[in-house]
Amino acid sequence: YGCPSMDELESYNQEFKKRLDEVGALGDIPDDLALEVSSPGADRVLKVPDDLNRFKEMPMRVFYTENIESNCLEMDGVFILDSIENDSEICVWKLADVKENRDPTKKGKPLNRKQKDWRLRLPFNLHRMVNLYID
């Protein structure tokens, strides 16, 4: 999903250590430095639109408003990114086929045609928060 592989991380780490050792040998930096790398959790907030393409195929919880007014009701849903229109600064979302979006009376049935065809066109500035959906 757009994240580096373990081999890429190992290669980067080796190159970084090599360069750090070279600079350390010159005495430009202390020789007792340590490097700690951590990845943000799946519940981190995603940047709109920058982070969205990385997770395009994954369900995301989108918190949004219908207009820019501060007293407008905030809504949320579980969607999959359909497309990003950079020129008009709009994200187009479709319903994710997750339990939360399905009819509870029809257990185990996927989304119907109307739900699959439905789209939410949402300007960048109306997104309040987006993060990965964790079922």
Image: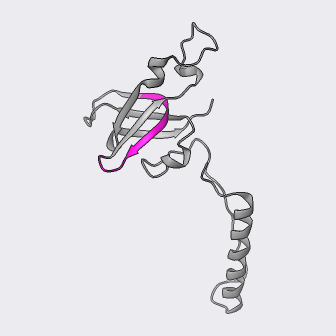
Considering depth in this image, is 112 or 122 the residue closer to the camera? 112
Any magenta on residue 86? yes
Is residue 96 shown left or right of residue 36? left
Q: Quadrant of the C terminus?
A: top right
Any magenta on residue 109? no
Residue beneath the point at 27% across and 33% down: 67
Q: Residue furthest left?
A: 69
Q: Residue furthest top?
A: 105
State the image coordinates of residue 20 (x, y, percent, origin top left).
68, 81
Above-or-below relation of 135 to 18: above
State the image coordinates of residue 115 (x, y, percent, origin top left).
46, 20
The residues colored magenta run 76-88
Above-or-below relation of 46 to 34: above
Is residue 85 shown left or right of residue 39? left
Residue beneath the point at 57% across and 34% down: 133
- Classify residue 6 by image quadrant: bottom right
**How is the rendered protein coloured?**
one colour
Considering depth in this image, is 82 or 11 the residue closer to the camera? 82
Residue beneath the point at 49% across and 46% down: 52
Considering depth in this image, is 46 or 38 the residue closer to the camera? 46
Residue beneath the point at 63% across and 11% down: 107
